[in-house]
Image (spheres, coloured by chain):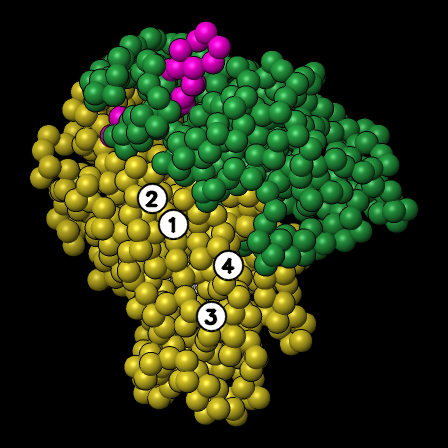
Amino acid sequence: MTPKDEQELAQYVKDAGANGRKLRIRGGGTRLALGNAVSYDDMVSMDGFSGVSLYEPGALTLVAGAGTPLREITETLRKSGQQLPFEPMDHCALLSSTGEPTIGGVVACNISGPRRIQAGACRDSLIGVRFVNGQGDVIKNGGRVMKNVTGYDLVKLMAGSFGSLGILTEVAFKVLPIPETQTTITLHEVDLDVAVQAMSSALGSPFDVTGAAHLPALENTPSKTLLRIEGFAKSVKYRADKLAAKLSRFGEVSQSYDDHDIWTDIQNVTRLSGTIDAIWRVSVKPSDAPQFCETLAKNCPNAAVQLDWGGGLIWARVPNDFDLRQCLNVAGHATLIRGDGFAAFQPQPSVLAKVEQNLRQKFDPVGILNTGIMG
Amino acid sequence: MEMPIPSEMVLSRKSDIVARLRAVLSDDAIISEPSQTQAYECDALTAYRCAPMAVVLPRNTQQVSDVLRICFELNVPVVPRGSGTSLAGGALPTADSVVLGVARMNGVLETNYDDRYIRVQSGRTNLSVTGAVEQNDFFYAPDPSSQLACAIAGNVAMNSGGAHCLKYGVTTNNLLGVTMVMMNGEIVEIGGAHLDAAGLDLLGVICGSEGQLGVVTEATLRILHKPEGARPVLIGFDSNEVAGACVSDIIKAGVLPVAIEFMDRPCIEAVEDFAKAGYPDAEAVLIIEVEGSEAEIAEQLEKITAIAKQHNPIELRESKSSEESAAIWAGRKAAFGAMGRISDYMCLDGTIPVSELPLVLRRIGELSKQYGLKVANVFHAGDGNMHPLILFNANKPGDLELCESMGAEILKLCVEVGGCLTGEHGVGVEKRDLMMTQYNAADIETQLHVKDVFDPAWLLNAAKVFPLSTTKSRRAS
Ligand SMILES: Cc1cc2nc3c(=O)[nH]c(=O)nc-3n(C[C@H](O)[C@H](O)[C@H](O)COP(=O)(O)OP(=O)(O)OC[C@H]3O[C@@H](n4cnc5c(N)ncnc54)[C@H](O)[C@@H]3O)c2cc1C
């Protein structure tokens, strides 16, 4: 089923509810593997909700249908020298999926990339949503202005709700200028704990670092710790030189300009994608990353990891039957991104689990939207 | 303005309720004498006052939990309170309520520079969060003008912004986690020192929920290293339109200043009288601040002034020293005080798409003539968050009402052009009855569902945010 507008979608959802038919929502189909398995009767395609409906470069705002291909949005913004600040990752390599990612899918899964540490996550740039709830009501929240505290912020709630609270039809963003240039500072061949210290030192500097990742040694490639600085040319050079000097106490440092590919690889976790093993995404505070990674290595000698967000985001590749959560001995949580041996999301403490369940029940009383995706 | 009729049931049991609360608090942490509860009768929206039945001032999360459990059991309404600087009446009590003030919970619980966060009790003032980390050259970014007084509790509840949020975002973008007590006394931890909490983004909906979902007792906040330096430039124009166009061109050129503040003629004149900041005789003044090292500041200011010059400014004043920077900011920072000196005023904070600025300013001018009330505009131009100050005389019968209806017209205009009723101050009681201009019944119902989940008995700050008619059946049950 491919509804052509909100009204048709709303009626369709109403009918589905009346007939107890469960729906699976599909954007570009590149991230369908995220979350737990969904039981459904009908697939709803968002292809009918495609197109940028408003773009004002001078106001840094863009509004688009949820089914709009991400590529179209990126291109539209690029023509005016702007971009989505949060650098959403592409899951195709990791999930062996094909198709055109849509902006609705990005929002539903709150997808962000390396720049999240400096510019915020998808949810931080999202300023408005329209959606159809499980009863077939069309709901709006937020709007097209970047400062808005009118009523509850359901915009944040919808971001990362994996389609379990409503079917997004339209999304609005605050966008930012594309930086004129970028520099990558590489720290060569340091251990993971030193890398995390170096990244913390960089992120705690005044030099406005927009990417901080560590790629441990893998097969024949030695380890690399990467720091990114972006902005106007003179400013970038000044800050990069300062930062390189600051980091030299941790090891050998080099600089390269406009090395976009390496950041795309980090963003898309390309280096861990090649096998059929499970992929986990672990969120911890950066200084806890070394301890967790050490425990993981002890319990799972085959594990391969990649650190982003200064160590706060750990991507781990482990055998399918390995329960990574057993190694999570620090505060944080782990999400199973690829593989189906375990629940996709970390179980919540009971009071919060109840709150979440009750919210879902209110937004989708019959339980027909992406049922079971979040557990 | 209408408030719910206080519950006789609750009022008649006052001494019993107070005794129960006293049992879990130290003697100096509960106030129930009418002569003393009066100090809590309003927040910064002073037009509306109502002393609460009692005030409690707990010292920690456990005490907050004890208080809420008792109020929950006895069906007593609770109004959370930080420092009482809300401009929307968010902390306005009802006569049958217990005001739960967190002002005594102002400690720093943890600072972590490696992971760049601070954990504080929620009664700590905004400025003293920065105060706790500035010896290490760190700061907490959201900076409401009220930062000397307002508490993190209120900032979280209102999702407060500040002059520098164009670059650093508002409270929600800098909040990592909270400890919150639910109305039934249950204590929950949401988020934490790591980015991106598990599950649904409950933190996102709690921030900005105006004290209706739970009482926030602790908060984990992101801290940042201070920039090496900052410098403002002041640019005067002979029309609002041109100033607006200049803002838009700067943004389009890819420059992202940390702040772009806009003042119109009535505001410039008032602050000149008051602060003698030496502002030019202009229709509109922009203060644009950029950050970084000397060289970086110079690079950005060069781009900004080049763009400004294409708009024929009547004055362009780049600060050359910290004294000059302070002078440029002095007028802006004194704006509210200056207004307060010449008149009573009502401060609106609707947001509009930046492109609608000239139209909205023109319409406000027309409304000002029509209502016979002066309006001064001072606002965050980069993000379209307006702050029209309507001047009125509180001692003149009917003037407040006149001012309120003019305010309502301006806010409706903001919504009409694609904006919203409030950009950072919150709805409170002040804009409650205008909610239907921005949202329809289904939109509101969805928000009420969220409150149903967190506070099914509707005891927590229940007379705020939503039109009373939409919440009546829930509050009654
Ligand atoms: C001169 C002046 C300038 C201002 N400038 C700005 C500005 O630049 N930007 C801006 O955004 N705001 C501004 N404000 C508005 C105000 O300061 C903010 O809304 C502030 O966040 C309120 O904080 P508070 O601690 O005073 O909260 P209060 O006024 O005490 O309460 C505000 C709301 O928070 C709720 N609340 C309080 N404590 C808790 C808690 N522990 N748990 C849950 N809910 C709670 C209350 O119930 C109420 O709804 C200004 C106000 C004044 C008077």
- Residue underneath mark 3: B65
* Image coordinates for residue A330, horizontal then vertical, percent: 45, 42
* Image coordinates for residue A146, horizontal then vertical, percent: 47, 39
Q: Are marks 1 and 2 in contact (CB under 8 Å)?
A: yes
Report the span colored magenta.
A206-224
Type of amino acid at the residue the image marks with label 2: Tyr
* Image coordinates for residue A36, horizontal then vertical, percent: 70, 37
User: Are dots 1 and 2 on a single chain?
Assistant: yes
Q: Quadrant of ligand 1?
A: bottom left
Q: Chain of mark 4?
A: B
User: Are dots 2 and 3 on a single chain?
Assistant: yes
- Residue underneath mark 2: B117
Type of amino acid at the residue the image marks with label 3: Ser
What mark, if any, has residue A193 been given in the picture? none
**Quadrant occupied by the C terminus of chain A:** top right
When asked about the image quadrant of residue A197, the answer is: top left
Q: Residues within 10 Å of mark 3 (few under 14, many from 20)?
A: many
- Residue underneath mark 4: B188
Pick whichever of labels 4 and 2 is earlier in the sequence: 2
Q: Is residue A93 visible?
A: no
Q: Is residue B404 left or right of residue A27?
A: left
Q: Chain of mark 1?
A: B
The correct choice, above or below, for B14 with respect to A229 in the image is below
* Label 4 – label 3 distance at C-alpha: 10 Å
* Chain with colour yellow in the figure: B
Q: Chain of mark 3?
A: B
- Residue underneath mark 1: B220
Type of amino acid at the residue the image marks with label 1: Thr
Q: Colour of chain A?
A: green
Residue drawn at 74 percent across, 42 percent down: A372
